[in-house]
Image (cartoon, rainbow, N blue to C red):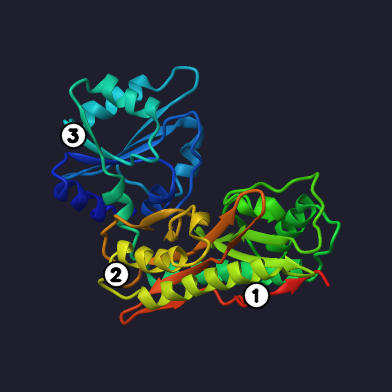
Amino acid sequence: MPDLSEYRQLARDMSVDAVALVPGPNFTRALGKAFMSHERPFVVVVPAEGQAAAIVPNLELASWGLVGFEGAVFDWRDQTGYDDAFTALAAHIPIRSLAVEGQVMRVFVSAAFTLALPDLRIVDGEREISGLRSIKTDEDIAALQAAIDISERALVRVIADVRVGQTEKQVEQALIQALFAEGAESLAFSPIVAAGDNSARPHGKARNDYQIRTGDALLFDFGARKDGFAADITRTFFVQDVSDEGREVYDTVLRANKIGFEACRPGVTAHDIDDAVTSVLEASPFADRIRTKTGHGLGRDVHEAPYIMRGNHQKILPGMVWTNEPGLYALDSFGVRIEDDVLVTADGCRSLTHFPKELTIIGR
């Protein structure tokens, strides 16, 4: 039986009758096995007192058996629908209040709960539930490091072959192939490979119809996934040549990135780090090119707490991992972002990414 005691205690701490988990990072962490999120409701309910129970689509029962779950299971079939399963669970664990993952649970699952329990009070427990995984274990950090190492080896392969005239899509495909060749289990997210004006779009998509040109900024934002954990790395290169403006922008972003490391130590807040990093960008001639916060937490999710932004006064604690990714973006011209994955330690921090950050010209 998976150890769900943290979630049981969380329900007590939040003064709710139970906590609900649905397929996603928290579900996988709690149960030790990943399941798909699809049109079929799939929920584990952990009460403050007593055994947990689960609503499981019938077609998942064989896989569910591998979890070792010892609580009550209410399965349902596509042919009959899931309303009776929710009614049975409500009779088995009578609850009046339920904490759910506000960023993950979908409306139709919430509606199924309220149909079975009309007086149910649903509470957004996203911060508290996801917060249980904000402090990484040694095993978590090892998985993150493995994902990062795979990603960096893949990037070395790809930039060696970049040439003027290639399309962004061709380079993206080479990157994906390299990630799997180096040992990725899956992609952390769809990679961003963006050249020229596309590099100024923080989440630009690779184009089939743009050929890389001399002088282009070429931005890679990507990561492998290994043992359930995601890398998230960004490096920006210049192809064959770099303008004086490009060099100055790059140097500014690199200074901001380095300040992020200097500002990080246990007890400071996410606000403090973002304020230090963003102040460097604001003091430059390129302040009008700031478009994003400094970063976000990283782990089973690519974006999770803590969010490194002004106004977020969450304290940074040893074991947290966050992305240090300042950037400057001139629309219709070019953008530069440098992103490292940072582990908070007892006396400061250290970078889990080791790929060089000095301005690099590729495609010679």
Q: Is mark 3 on a helix, strand or loop?
A: strand
Q: How far apart are marks 2 and 1 (CA)?
A: 31 Å
Q: Which of marks 3 and 1 is in front?
A: 1
Q: What element carries label 1?
A: loop
Q: Earlier in the sequence, mark 2 or mark 1?
A: 2
Q: Residue 327: where, in percent of width, then height?
A: 53, 61
Q: Name the residue under label 1.
A: 359
Say which residue appears at 32% left-offset and 73% top-offset.
Answer: 318
Direction front: furthest residue: 285
Say which residue appears at 18% left-offset and 23% top-offset.
Answer: 119
Q: Earlier in the sequence, mark 3 or mark 2?
A: 3
Residue 93's image quarter? top left
- Tell whether 295 sits left or right of 270: right
**Identity of the amino acid at label 3?**
Ser
Say which residue appears at 29% left-offset and 26% top-offset.
Answer: 113
Please identify the quadrant where the C terminus is shown. bottom right
Q: What element carries label 2?
A: loop
**Identity of the amino acid at label 2?**
Leu
On screen, residue 281 above or below 113: below
Q: Earlier in the sequence, mark 3 or mark 1?
A: 3
**Identity of the amino acid at label 1?**
Leu
Q: Name the residue under label 2.
A: 317
On screen, residue 354 above or below 322: below
Q: Residue 302: where, in percent of width, then height?
A: 49, 55
Q: Can residue 154 be seen in this view?
A: no
**Cβ atoms at labels 3 and 1 below 8 Å apart:** no
Q: Which of marks 3 and 2 is in front?
A: 2
- Tell whether 132 sits left or right of 213: left
Q: Residue 140: where, in percent of width, then height?
A: 43, 67
- Tell whether 49 sits left or right of 201: left
Q: Mark 3 points at which residue?
A: 97
